[in-house]
């Protein structure tokens, strides 16, 4: 069965979802993304073809030609989630039409008619106010004959060391489909210490000589003083001397950002990784013990990338800010694997006659 399943990954980025599919035994024929800087990581780790193209310019016929005649065709994708983020939803004046990419996904599904589809995004897609994007998305898929399952998934339930919540959708033309049951209970959650506690100790601004991806951003003297006073899971409101506090945070609106410049807790999964997760001023991204923000490698591991995942060919070609963005935007590979295993299980049940229309 696995040998028949092939996937194409829209909005593939550096390959988090595709890598997970490969681990689940699904062949990934290609990934498509408009950010050409993702090419090295995607092709090197996923052993697949990267197509640099704007999804609005892609035709269904182009993707159909990537599949073999007898393939069970799987089309997956994670459209850019920034338009649906908590921050963006508060910005009434901010115009961002990237949410319309979901309709491009529907267009391609209509043109390709894949057997299985999957979409992953932020839970706030359910609350998008400009129009009922997600409801429209589901209705269109149901009209096309897909059995649809969707739910908000809590990543620690599936062995990901991060308190990330994601909206996952699965669709099949062959019968009812669903994500496999959680693999971890609360007591089994993988903590920050479990995930990165054994990595080489480096200081602010340093890189490991053994792994150039294990590199931390350099903090100013004042930020070093701030993180030294920060406690695990604490807040600048309680932990810092008055002279270290930022004026913007003393305002009523600023007081609501109590987690910025904070340290993670060793004994819990990490906060959600974002595109700025390697800077302490953007959230609770301080290392639990060391006086620095988490490194690129630590952020990647907390996203469930394996410790040997290749993001650049050398230290000279590594672009720190760009790589941080790529890691934060990625689908956690372990979640990709869970989605892939769910598809394999579903198709095996269909083949064995346990789950039919």
Image (spheres, rainbow, N blue to C red):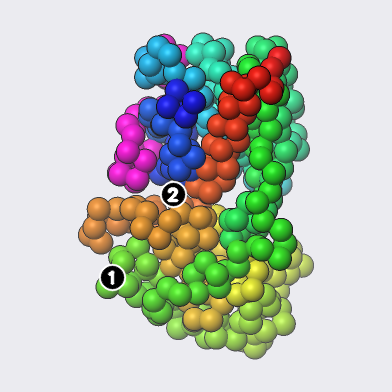
Residue 268, horizontal then vertical, whole percent: 65, 69
Q: Is residue 156 visible?
A: yes
Label annotation for residue 210: 1
Residue 9, horizontal then vertical, whole percent: 46, 31
Residue carrying label 2: 326
- Where 255 falls versus 73 (above or below)? below
- The residue depicted at 54 percent of the width and 13 percent of the height is 113
In front of the other: 101 or 342: 342
Give the extent of the magenta segment.
35-61
User: Mark 1, residues whose alpha carbon is within 10 Å: few (<14), some, or many (≥20)?
Assistant: few
Quarter containing the C terminus: top right
Quarter occupied by residue 238: bottom right
Left or right of 324 in this view: 250: right
Label annotation for residue 266: none
The span from disc 2 to disc 1 (Cα, nearest Å) is 22 Å
* Element on which disc 2 rests: helix
Of the numbered discs 2 and 1, the one sitting upstream in the chain is 1
Residue 290 falls inside the magenta stretch: no
* Element on which disc 1 rests: loop
Residue 41 falls inside the magenta stretch: yes
- Where 58 falls versus 335 (above or below)? above
Q: Is residue 329 visible?
A: no
Quarter occupied by residue 261: bottom right
């Amino acid at each position: 069965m696995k040998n028949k399943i092939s996937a194409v990954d829209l909005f593939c980025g550096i390959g988090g979802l595709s890598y997970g599919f490969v681990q689940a035994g699904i062949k990934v024929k290609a990934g498509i993304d408009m950010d050409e800087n993702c090419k090295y990581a995607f092709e090197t780790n996923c052993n697949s073809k990267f197509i640099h193209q704007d999804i609005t310019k892609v035709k269904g016929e182009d993707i159909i030609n990537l599949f073999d005649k007898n393939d069970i065709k799987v089309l997956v994708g994670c459209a850019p989630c920034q338009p649906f983020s908590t921050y963006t939803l508060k910005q009434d004046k901010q115009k961002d039409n990237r949410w319309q990419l979901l309709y491009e996904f529907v267009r391609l599904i209509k043109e390709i008619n894949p057997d299985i589809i999957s979409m992953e995004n932020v839970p706030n897609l359910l609350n998008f106010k400009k129009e009922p994007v997600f409801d429209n998305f589901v209705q269109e898929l149901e009209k096309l004959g897909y059995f649809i399952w969707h739910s908000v998934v809590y990543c620690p339930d599936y062995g990901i060391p991060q308190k990330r919540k994601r909206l996952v959708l699965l669709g099949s033309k062959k019968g009812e489909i669903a994500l496999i049951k959680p693999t971890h209970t609360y007591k089994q959650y993988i903590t920050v210490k479990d995930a990165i506690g054994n990595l080489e100790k480096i200081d602010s601004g340093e890189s490991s000589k053994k792994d150039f991806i294990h590199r931390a951003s350099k903090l100013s003297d004042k930020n070093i003083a701030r993180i030294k006073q920060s406690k695990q899971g604490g807040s600048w409101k309680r932990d810092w001397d008055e002279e270290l506090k930022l004026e913007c945070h003393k305002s009523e609106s600023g007081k609501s950002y109590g987690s910025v410049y904070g340290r993670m807790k060793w004994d819990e999964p990490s906060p959600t990784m974002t595109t700025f997760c390697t800077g302490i001023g953007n959230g609770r991204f301080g290392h639990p013990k060391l006086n620095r923000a988490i490194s690129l490698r630590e952020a990647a591991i907390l996203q469930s990338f394996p410790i040997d995942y290749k993001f650049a060919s050398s230290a000279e070609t590594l672009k720190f800010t760009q790589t941080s963005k790529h890691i934060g935007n990625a689908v956690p590979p372990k979640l990709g694997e869970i989605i892939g295993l769910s598809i394999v299980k579903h198709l095996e049940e269909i083949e064995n006659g346990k789950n039919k229309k």
